């Protein structure tokens, strides 16, 4: 039953009760549903304060020799009705009183006395040591109406482009931090009662318990409007009990299917060619590796979007579903209760899909099932936790052992990180010292010959400049990729033809085949002036 129908039934019951009550107290009943939004407002007959105090509203002003009419409620004192009736009689006028429902009274009062739309200052992110900004934001958040504080926090996080909201219980207050462009920034300190309101809103919307003694996961959606633009925001909610209460992390996914586009990810031409080769011949297995928050899901979804044509059946297994894509059958898998992706994967293979995405390979059973699927004509996409592409192979070998089938199934492994992009309008140049230049030369000394490297003598680099419009000197993030195409050389390691299957040996072989490492691609981005050495060292 939808919400509108429930409200309509509730209102019908309320009007029925009011009609019966009118007969008991000897008043005429008036059903205001058809006129409560259009009835002319009669200003000057009763003060708004009187209308609030007496729970009474004027319905007619006695023009055209008709009686003066008032709507009263069951909460209107009889003495007020008698007094007003006597007053009109003394002036030779007639006053009539009609019993109206509480909902009708409230609807009319919202027109006579519209609620004030509170305007709160936008949240600003503080620089290191900037306690004044944190204090101002804290004051704003603690002043926001209880009904609005949760929505206000999410709206502001989305406006700032935050990927996460961290709400952390401390001994004396609640700390709020937001992750923006991959870096956590303190935002405010909340009073404890503010957090109770936020946790209550989380509980009802994300279907979690406020009294749980175990970690919980939830999911919710919220429409966010900024100016004339409205978009749907997906939120993944994680809570965990701590010493002083339940901490919460809200991950924000700004759903816009047009953003899930390989053309918008800034992938270098050679790496893009390798991905296009997979998309154009969808078979085998592709793994995305990297830590949480490195953009793996966005790249995978963008590949799914590129594969999403009417002649392909695409199925996904996800925990949870982060983006909803039209034309793709997405299946949620709750892995917190003993289930794993392998169970769901075996089931959906019976549906004859062309492309399958598995949220994450976490265990040997899922790995073997995914490999089996990839050699029977399917393209299997998945994520896998490893620091680099070579580390993914050594970890997979630890998980399932030397597996000749895996060597023929796996086609491409993509390692990925996100680094902050310098703000082009504010960045400034500087000349690095000799030690820095030697470090850059060391990183790039064995880069494949097909990669163009600028002259490192007389090198100029860029650094961020903090301004009011760009408080950290960075604006947005760029993707840094490392892509290992599984050649015959790499297959030898996976089949067990090579004695040394350690990460270093696999990486050395891949570099001989022309792979550019994460660090080398990051260094090239520094040389192009897109980011900084500090950012590359922080992330990679």
Image: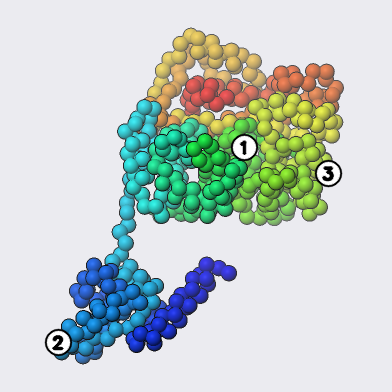
For the residues labelled 2 and 1, the Cα–Cα distance comes to: 80 Å
Direction from residue 81 to residue 141 in the image, left or right: right
Please give the name of the residue rendered at 40% of the width and 78% of the height, measured from the top-left corner: 33
Direction from residue 343 to residue 481 in the image, left or right: left
Whole-percent x, y for residue 448 in the image: 65, 20
Label disc, if present, on residue 376 of the rendered structure:
3
Q: Can residue 36 be seen in this snapshot?
A: no
- Report if the CB atoms under discs 2 and 1 are less than 8 Å apart: no
Locate the N terminus and report the quarter of the image it occupies: bottom right
Label 1 sits on residue: 296
Looking at the image, is mark 3 or mark 2 nearer the viewer? 2
Direction from residue 418 to residue 176 in the image, left or right: left
Q: Can residue 9 be seen in this snapshot?
A: yes
Please give the name of the residue rendered at 47% of the width and 33% of the height, measured from the top-left corner: 184
Please give the name of the residue rendered at 61% of the width and 14% of the height, measured from the top-left corner: 445
Label 2 sits on residue: 90
* Disc nearer the start of the sequence (3/2): 2
Q: Within 10 angstroms of label 3, few (less than 14), some, or many (20 or more) residues?
A: few
Q: Within 10 angstroms of label 1, few (less than 14), some, or many (20 or more) residues?
A: many
Quadrant position of residue 397: top right
């Amino acid at each position: 039953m939808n919400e509108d129908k429930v409200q309509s039934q509730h209102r019908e019951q309320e009007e029925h009760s009011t009609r019966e009550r009118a007969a008991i107290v000897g008043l005429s009943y008036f059903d205001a549903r058809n006129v409560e939004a259009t009835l002319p407002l009669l200003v000057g007959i009763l003060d708004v304060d009187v209308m609030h105090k007496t729970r009474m509203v004027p319905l007619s002003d006695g023009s055209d020799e008709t009686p003066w009419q008032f709507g009263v409620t069951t909460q209107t004192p009889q003495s007020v009705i008698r007094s007003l009736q006597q007053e009109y009689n003394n002036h030779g006028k007639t006053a009539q009183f009609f019993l109206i429902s509480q909902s009708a009274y409230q609807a009319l009062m919202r027109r006579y006395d519209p609620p004030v739309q509170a305007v709160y200052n936008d949240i600003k992110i503080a620089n290191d040591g900037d306690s004044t900004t944190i204090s101002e934001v804290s004051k704003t958040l603690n002043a926001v109406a209880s009904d609005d504080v949760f929505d206000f926090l999410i709206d502001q996080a989305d406006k700032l482009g935050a990927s996460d909201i961290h709400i952390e219980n401390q001994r004396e207050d609640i700390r709020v931090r937001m992750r923006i462009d991959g870096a956590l920034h303190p935002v405010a300190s909340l009073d404890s009662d503010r957090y109770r309101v936020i946790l209550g809103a989380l509980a009802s919307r994300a279907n979690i318990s406020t009294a749980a003694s175990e970690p919980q996961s939830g999911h919710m959606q919220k429409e966010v409007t900024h100016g004339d633009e409205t978009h749907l925001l997906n939120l993944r909610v994680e809570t965990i009990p701590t010493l002083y209460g339940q901490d919460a992390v809200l991950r924000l996914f700004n759903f816009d299917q047009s953003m899930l586009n390989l053309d918008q990810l800034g992938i270098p031409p050679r790496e893009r060619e390798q991905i296009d080769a997979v998309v154009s011949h969808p078979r085998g297995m592709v793994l995305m590796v990297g830590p949480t928050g490195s953009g793996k899901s966005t790249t995978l979804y963008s590949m799914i979007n590129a594969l999403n044509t009417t002649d392909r059946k695409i199925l996904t297994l996800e925990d949870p579903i982060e983006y909803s894509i039209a034309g793709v059958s997405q299946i949620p898998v709750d892995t917190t209760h003993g289930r794993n992706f392998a169970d769901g994967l075996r089931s959906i293979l019976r549906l004859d899909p062309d492309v399958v995405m598995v949220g994450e390979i976490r265990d040997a059973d899922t790995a073997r099932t995914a490999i089996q699927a990839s050699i029977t004509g399917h393209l299997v996409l998945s994520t896998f936790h490893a620091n680099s592409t070579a580390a993914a192979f050594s970890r997979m070998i630890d998980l399932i052992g030397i597996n000749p089938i895996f060597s023929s199934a796996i086609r491409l492994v993509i390692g990925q990180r996100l680094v902050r992009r310098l703000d082009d309008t504010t960045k400034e140049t500087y000349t690095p010292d000799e030690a820095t230049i030697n470090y850059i030369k060391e990183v790039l000394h064995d880069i494949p010959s097909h990669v163009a490297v600028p002259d490192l003598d007389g090198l100029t680099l860029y650094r961020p400049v903090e301004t009011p419009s760009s408080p950290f000197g960075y604006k947005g993030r760029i993707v840094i990729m490392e892509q290992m195409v599984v050649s015959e050389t790499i297959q030898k390691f996976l089949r067990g033809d090579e004695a040394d299957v350690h990460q270093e040996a696999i990486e050395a072989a891949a570099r001989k085949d022309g792979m550019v490492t994460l660090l080398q691609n990051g260094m090239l981005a520094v040389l192009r002036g897109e980011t900084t050495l500090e950012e590359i060292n922080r992330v990679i």
